[in-house]
Amino acid sequence: MSSLFVNKDSIVRKIWGNADTVLLIFAGAAAEFPLNKAVDWLYFTGRLPADPLGRLFSTVQYAQQIVFSGYDDALAAIDRITAIHKAVEANRGDKIPDAAYLDVLFMLIDYSIRSAELLGRKLNKAEKMEVFDVFHRVGSRMGLKRLPPDYEQWLVMRSAYLGSNLVRSTFTQDLLRQYKRHLGAFRYYILLQAQAIVVPARVRKLLSLPSLAIRSPILLAYKASRFLKFDKLIKALLLPAAYKIQIAGLDRA
């Protein structure tokens, strides 16, 4: 039996094995994706605007596959991701900017930590470094350049990227419209509330997300629903029926 890519007792498995934290990671990524300066690459195949939720679920599921696979299977999954991107580059006759790859990797690190802390407890530095290490190894396997060597340098680079690599563009506007069209007005409203809770201030400002004044009541209400075992019913009501199977598969606890 091959060794594991992520140890069984790792905080990363706890984070990515819980549907609640994964959905919050999903919400954060759904907010930041449209602001990426290289978001035009996500439009090149036409798949993102046609099915934005499906594409985001695909990204999340690949991450889960890596986290919960044996070492060799995880490397194979990473190589498939790399091959998909290389094929898109070949079809367009151009190269996806390194910054775009790093942005996505940085999002996975950042929203993993933010979601775990919002729905659970504060992570200690060793746990945060563990989250960084897992996704750093993913980036290394993909051959990404300019990867930060450690967690401290990642904090510096993440802050810099938030300041320089995000912009509200026509692609942003279109993708937000697609979210609303696929979710419906009420579910889209709920998504905005979740995004306001989890995203960094820079993202919140660019998207004009709701005030953080609502943060505590929403978190308290949802945590109470988990305690009372109502959370599955709430998720069933709030999340699109078309994705029920994918959502159920997110919970690896």
Image (cartoon, grey):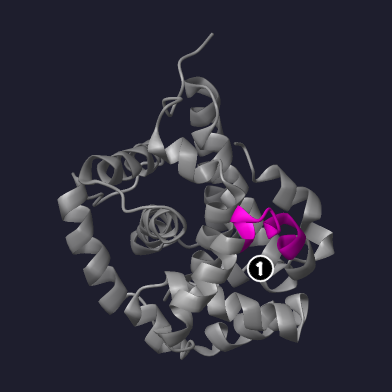
Q: Is 230 a magenta residue?
A: yes
Q: How many marks?
A: 1
* Residue at image point 65% right, 60% down: 55
Lateral position of residue 212 relative to residue 82, left or right: left
Q: Main secondary structure of the magenta part?
A: helix
Residue 73 appears at what percent x and percent y?
55, 25
* Residue at image point 33% right, 75% down: 165
Q: Is residue 90 visible?
A: no
Lateral position of residue 54 relative to residue 33, left or right: right
Lateral position of residue 158 relative to residue 23, left or right: left
Q: Residues within 10 Å of mark 1 (few under 14, many from 20)?
A: some
Q: Name the residue under label 1.
A: 48
Residue 60 vs 187, above or below: the answer is above
Q: Is mark 1 on a helix, strand or loop?
A: helix
Residue 37 vs 224, above or below: the answer is below
Q: Is 197 a magenta residue?
A: no
Q: Which amino acid does label 1 sit on?
A: Leu
Furthest-front residue in this view: 228
Of residue 32 and residue 124, the one placed in the foreground of this image is 124
Q: Check the picture and name the quadrant holding the C terminus.
A: top right
Give the magenta range: 225-235
Of residue 43 and residue 139, the one placed in the foreground of this image is 139
Residue 47 appears at what percent x and percent y?
70, 65
* Residue at image point 54% right, 83% down: 172
Residue 42 vs 125, above or below: the answer is below
Residue 29 appears at what percent x and percent y?
50, 65
Residue 179 vs 240, above or below: the answer is below
